[in-house]
């Protein structure tokens, strides 16, 4: 069956459920000091938004390190949000990209920079483009070029890699095209009850000066950079440290997790942004990570279960949104001053750390990357990984690894102590690239705001030391210096030396040894000095391009076939005749593998409402919170697709239907699109 492609208009549905009193945040003229005339604005700012969703079926999901967590559908699409900022006085600019993605690997960083260079020449380079991930644990994996991150995905998945790279580049393009005179306003707030320290015993090992800065063992700082044009808020970037682990390791649907929901809510449910519409959206919001290494959203310190995790995700996202929206109503500080940035590549496996950064008056060295048994245990509060491993001491596994697997040299043992090396990744890198050793470290300045781009998961106390290091050199207020975690690459965790000694999950995952944080402080100090003095720093040799060495072990889709006596798109289980708000509509279709076409920038499904004149209008798609798209095999080549829609409160009564858009692969490899349409049903 087929259906005409309707006009997209979701306003009647999306307004339903918006929090009372918060629905107009960012849409009214601000009550702050009047904005300067457009011609006098100090910055040009552009906003960009694009779909960066990869495969949603038969691909390992990234984050929990579980072989059994294979994607089987889609809950919310993953978005990339970009902000270009140019100083009109100097012409210098930076590009900030925040992706609903588990990690930003060097594979993606290099590819996006290549495309930017092809399009814009030297306008956007490694020196002024900061790409960060929200670290959702419900995204598809397989887009790294380093083997460790592709083990649970059975190798490299080019379709997902291309979708991520396409989305980030497209968001950057749109941000560049959107550049216009704008005001930037910075504000800080406090958000409690949204995070908990999942590694409290390790945190308590830190000096009193660090612990006193976080009396509840959490970093409650929430920071908002908002974009204003003619007195109206048209964009915002929020930084708050909390893991995107609200979705369970038992979940099988691709999801943007709590930070993705916060952005979705502000854009879609408050501002009626239509992700499928052409043109620049009226509002773009990004919820970025900072030093979230030991910050969990699971306040009971227990891994969530599914399907209860959907409510947890929404609740965590709403808390972050509410804090950001409240800041958007406060005066804040209008930014002025330079836009600048520096990036260097550091071989973290071979850094001599000077005494002023080690804290004990002696020089120390980092080492080749290694992991301990506590890393294999996973974070037991968010999602344990492999059974048989524990956080802290693992004498059995330590003995096995040291006597059977690998003999550690005295130099490596000293640099990694008290970690007992279980997996010597540095030695494995000699044979094949498992993890990255040469990593980018970045410092970005936008007026009084400084962002330290670290390609890893930084604990709050480790972040505090990095922030103090930079703030002391550039003369900034501490709150105006933030760690931008998960930036430009990925090298696991960053703990303080004291936390490292506890060898919890975070310490076992700090690859380059006890002195890794001091090495990063030393690097950040060099960047801050250069930024302060206006001098250049040699970037050093970049990370090697491994695009020709990625292993792909999982075969693609071979053939799709409908069930016997059925056609693609046939309705196998129809909806009921009537529903009320709060009930779930469910329709099962004879489908095909969604990996044939990822529908990036489009949708696998539509919920349509019949207008009084008889036309059908789309009120929801696969990017909406209320919809879910489930896929499963039916035999060898057949697929069943189940589409659900939770009817929102306030839905306009009347006739509705579900439309499914699929793509079938023939025995010759040709992919043909098809459409299935459910019988009409009535919402009362």
Image: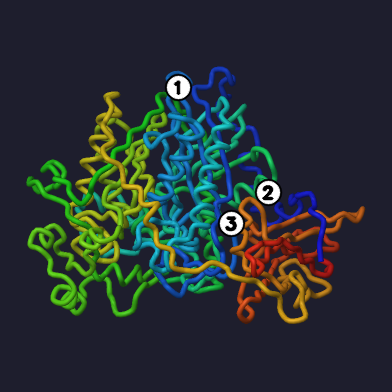
Q: How does the figure colour the protein chain or chains?
A: rainbow
Q: Which numbered circle lies on residue 276?
A: 2
Residue occupying image coordinates x 35% and y 38%: 481
Mark 2, residues whose alpha carbon is within 10 Å: few (<14), some, or many (≥20)? some
**Secondary element type, mark 2:** loop
Which badge, 1 or 2, is on the more N-terminal residue? 1
Marks 1 and 2, Cα distance to the nearest angstrom? 33 Å
In which quadrant of the rendered view does residue 665 lie? bottom right
Viewer can see residue 385: yes
Residue 236 at x, y percent in the picture: 53, 40
**Secondary element type, mark 1:** loop
Residue 255 at x, y percent in the picture: 54, 61
- Asked if the residues shown at circle 1 and circle 2 are in contact, with their CB atoms under 8 angstroms apart, the answer is no
**Secondary element type, mark 3:** loop
Which badge, 3 or 2, is on the more N-terminal residue? 3
Which residue does the numbered mark 1 point to in the structure image?
91
Is 404 drawn above or below residue 88 in the view shown? below
Q: Is residue 523 left or right of residue 109?
A: left
- Asked if the residues shown at circle 1 and circle 3 are in contact, with their CB atoms under 8 angstroms apart, the answer is no
Which residue does the numbered mark 3 point to in the structure image?
77
Residue occupying image coordinates x 52% and y 26%: 44
Is 55 drawn above or below residue 463 in the view shown? below
Marks 3 and 2, Cα distance to the nearest angstrom? 12 Å
Which badge, 1 or 3, is on the more N-terminal residue? 3
Q: Quarter of the image containing the N terminus?
A: bottom right
Q: Nearer the viewer, residue 516 or 154?
A: 154
Residue 109 at x, y percent in the picture: 41, 46
In which quadrant of the rendered view does residue 666 lie? bottom right
Viewer can see residue 190: no
Residue occupying image coordinates x 13% and y 57%: 415
Mark 3, residues whose alpha carbon is within 10 Å: few (<14), some, or many (≥20)? many
């Amino acid at each position: 069956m087929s259906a005409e492609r309707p006009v997209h208009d979701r306003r009647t549905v999306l307004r339903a459920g918006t929090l009372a009193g918060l629905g107009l945040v960012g849409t009214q003229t601000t009550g702050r000091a009047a904005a300067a005339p457009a011609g006098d604005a100090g910055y040009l700012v552009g906003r960009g938004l694009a779909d960066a969703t990869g495969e949603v079926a038969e691909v390992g999901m990234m984050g929990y390190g579980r072989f059994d967590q294979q994607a089987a559908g889609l809950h919310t699409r993953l978005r990339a949000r970009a902000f270009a900022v140019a100083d009109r006085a100097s012409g210098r600019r930076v590009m900030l990209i925040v992706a609903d993605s588990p990690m930003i690997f060097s594979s993606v960083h290099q590819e996006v920079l290549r495309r930017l260079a092809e399009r814009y020449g030297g306008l956007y380079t490694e020196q002024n483009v900061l790409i960060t991930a929200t670290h959702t644990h419900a995204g598809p994996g397989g887009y790294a070029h380093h083997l460790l991150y592709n083990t649970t995905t059975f190798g490299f998945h080019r379709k997902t890699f291309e979708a991520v790279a396409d989305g980030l580049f497209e968001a950057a393009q749109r941000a560049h095209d959107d550049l216009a005179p704008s005001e930037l306003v910075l504000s800080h707030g406090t958000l409690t009850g949204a995070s908990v320290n999942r590694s409290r015993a390790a945190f308590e090992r830190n000096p009193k000066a660090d612990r006193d800065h976080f009396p509840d063992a959490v970093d409650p700082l929430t920071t908002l950079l908002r974009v204003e044009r003619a007195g109206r808020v048209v964009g915002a970037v929020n930084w708050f440290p909390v893991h995107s682990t609200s979705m369970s390791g038992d979940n099988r649907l691709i999801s943007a997790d709590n930070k993705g929901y916060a952005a979705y809510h502000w854009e879609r449910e408050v501002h009626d942004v239509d992700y499928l519409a052409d043109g620049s959206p009226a509002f773009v919001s990004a919820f970025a990570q900072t030093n979230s290494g030991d910050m969990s959203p699971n306040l009971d310190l227990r891994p969530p279960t599914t399907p209860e995790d959907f409510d947890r995700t929404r609740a965590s996202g709403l808390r972050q949104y509410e804090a950001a929206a409240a800041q958007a109503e406060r005066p804040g500080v209008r930014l002025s001053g330079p836009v600048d940035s520096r990036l260097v590549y550091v071989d973290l496996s071979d850094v001599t750390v000077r005494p002023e950064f080690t804290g004990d008056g002696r020089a120390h060295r980092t080492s080749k990357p290694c992991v301990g048994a506590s890393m294999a245990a996973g974070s037991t509060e968010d999602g344990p990984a492999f059974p048989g491993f524990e956080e802290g001491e693992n004498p059995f596994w330590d003995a096995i690894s040291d006597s059977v697997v690998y003999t550690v040299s005295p130099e490596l043992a000293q640099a990694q102590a008290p970690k007992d090396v279980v997996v010597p990744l540095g030695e494995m890198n000699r044979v094949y690239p498992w993890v990255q050793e040469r990593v980018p470290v970045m410092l970005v300045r936008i007026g009084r705001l400084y962002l330290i781009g670290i390609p890893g998961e930084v604990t709050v106390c480790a972040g505090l030391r990095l922030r103090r290091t930079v703030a002391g050199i550039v003369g900034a207020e501490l709150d105006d210096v933030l760690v931008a975690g998960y930036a430009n690459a990925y090298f696991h965790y960053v703990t303080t030396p004291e936390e490292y000694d506890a060898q919890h999950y975070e310490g076992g995952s700090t690859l380059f040894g006890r002195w890794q944080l001091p090495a990063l402080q030393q690097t950040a100090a060099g960047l801050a000095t250069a930024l302060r003095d206006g001098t250049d720093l040699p970037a050093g040799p970049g990370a090697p391009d491994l695009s020709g060495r990625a292993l792909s072990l999982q075969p693609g889709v071979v053939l799709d076939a409908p069930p016997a006596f059925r056609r693609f798109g046939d309705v196998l289980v129809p909806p009921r005749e009537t529903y009320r708000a709060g009930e779930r509509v469910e329709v099962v279709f004879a489908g095909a593998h969604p990996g044939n076409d990822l529908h990036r920038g489009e949708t696998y499904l539509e919920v349509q409402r019949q207008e009084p004149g008889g036309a059908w209008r789309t009120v929801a798609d696969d990017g909406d919170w209320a919809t879910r798209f489930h896929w499963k095999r039916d035999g060898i080549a057949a697929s069943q697709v189940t589409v659900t829609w939770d009817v929102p409160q306030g839905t306009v009564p009347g006739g509705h239907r579900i439309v499914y858009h699929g793509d079938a692969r023939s025995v010759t490899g040709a992919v043909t699109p098809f459409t299935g349409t459910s019988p009409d049903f009535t919402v009362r």
